[in-house]
Image (cartoon, helix red, strand yellow):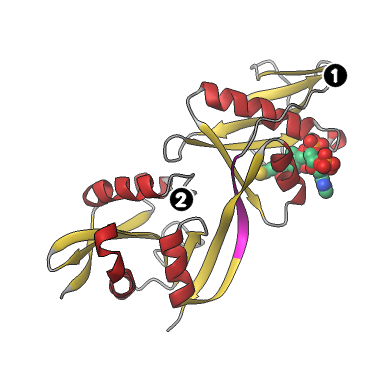
């Protein structure tokens, strides 16, 4: 039996990546790293036959290639996942695994091969349709004439909440994720927080997201309690966590 991990180009791993996406039918946080050229692709072979792939990118800086963030072995060869993964580590010299806890294959390898595991981000998925209503608030698309308050955490979104002719919140959804998922974000003007605006805004953006043919998803820092509670109130549920571990030497 000969297992190898061979550096290759993105094109070559794409058919296998389609299988990965089919198996992991949820928002992939680092989906765009491939197409943006921020990762190295490795083909995993068994006796010269293609059985999977790995992808390695920078944990902190884009030019680095120190972290395995995707790994896939076709189901019929899955029992070779651990030795195949060791070949990938050897070939790529990666020092970390970054993975979503809902990706069960890479999570199991994370627990097998790494130490000092920690999480910094919560991943959320669609759960239910909330029915929050607030009087005198208008939800609409942002227009070029809108005067938007200074955003400190998130980009200015395509949708706004208007109260007394002022924009008090903005949000939107990003599309650079695996189909059919989109990533929602929002920011409420500081003096208008904790009045239900954030959760109402997310509720309405979710509807727009579906109308655009996308399934809403979101993520937030583990310590951002306000964001987490807002997303849960607006009908998301926790799908997993981003995990980081250092590969044992
Ligand atoms: C996150 C944010 C959008 C929430 O907006 P908001 O208008 O205050 O949210 P809501 O009033 O709809 O609150 C929704 C829930 O979160 C809770 N909540 C909001 N802020 C909270 C805080 N600082 N601490 C604890 N709970 C909080 C509310 O109590 C409410 O829960 P409840 O109905 O069970 O009481 C706002 O804090 C913000 O703009 N933060 C900066 C940007 C940001 O972090 N965006 C999210 C990136 S993913």
Q: Is residue 36 visible?
A: no
| CA distance separating discs 1 and 2 | 38 Å
On screen, residue 85 versus residue 194, left or right, reads left
- Residue 41 sits in which quadrant? bottom left
Q: Which residue is mark 1?
A: 135
Q: Could you tell me which secondary element the residue under label 2 belongs to?
A: loop
- Residue 37 position, x and y percent, is 35, 49
Quarter of the image where ligand 1 sits = top right
Q: For the residue carrying disc 1, how many other residues have a C-alpha within 10 Å: few (<14), some (14-19), or many (20+)?
A: few
Say which mark, if any, is on residue 30.
Answer: 2
Tell me which secondary structure the magenta stretch mostly adopts.
Answer: strand
| First along the sequence among labels 1 and 2 | 2
222 shown above or below 191: below
Q: Quadrant of the C terminus?
A: bottom left
Residue 71 appears left or right of 238: left
Find the magenta span and give its range.
Answer: 119-126
**Viewport quadrant of the N terminus:** bottom left
Image height check: is 17 above or below 120? above
| Front label number (1 vs 2) | 1
In the image, residue 228 lies at what x, y percent?
71, 47
């Amino acid at each position: 039996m000969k297992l190898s991990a061979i550096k290759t180009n993105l094109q070559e791993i794409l058919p296998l990546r389609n299988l990965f996406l089919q198996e992991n039918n949820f928002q992939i946080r680092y989906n765009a790293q491939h197409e943006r050229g921020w990762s190295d692709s490795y083909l995993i072979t068994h006796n010269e036959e293609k059985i999977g792939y790995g992808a390695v990118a920078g944990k902190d800086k884009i030019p680095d290639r120190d972290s395995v963030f995707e790994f896939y072995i076709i189901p019929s060869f899955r029992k070779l996942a651990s030795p195949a993964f060791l070949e990938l580590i050897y070939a790529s010299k990666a020092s970390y695994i970054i993975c979503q806890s809902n990706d069960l294959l890479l999570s199991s390898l994370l627990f097998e091969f790494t130490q000092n595991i920690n999480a910094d981000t919560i991943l959320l998925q669609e759960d239910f349709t909330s029915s929050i209503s607030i009087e005198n608030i208008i939800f609409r698309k942002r227009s070029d004439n809108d005067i938007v308050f200074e955003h400190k955490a998130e980009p200015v979104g395509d949708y706004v909440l208007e109260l007394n002719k002022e924009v008090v919140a903005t949000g939107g959804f990003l599309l650079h994720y695996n189909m059919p998922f989109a990533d929602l974000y929002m920011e409420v003007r500081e003096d208008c927080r904790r009045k239900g605006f954030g959760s109402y805004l997310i509720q309405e953006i979710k509807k727009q997201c579906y109308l655009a043919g996308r399934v809403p998803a979101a993520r937030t820092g583990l310590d951002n309690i306000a964001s987490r509670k807002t997303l849960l109130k607006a009908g998301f549920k926790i799908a997993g966590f981003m995990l980081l571990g250092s590969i044992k030497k």
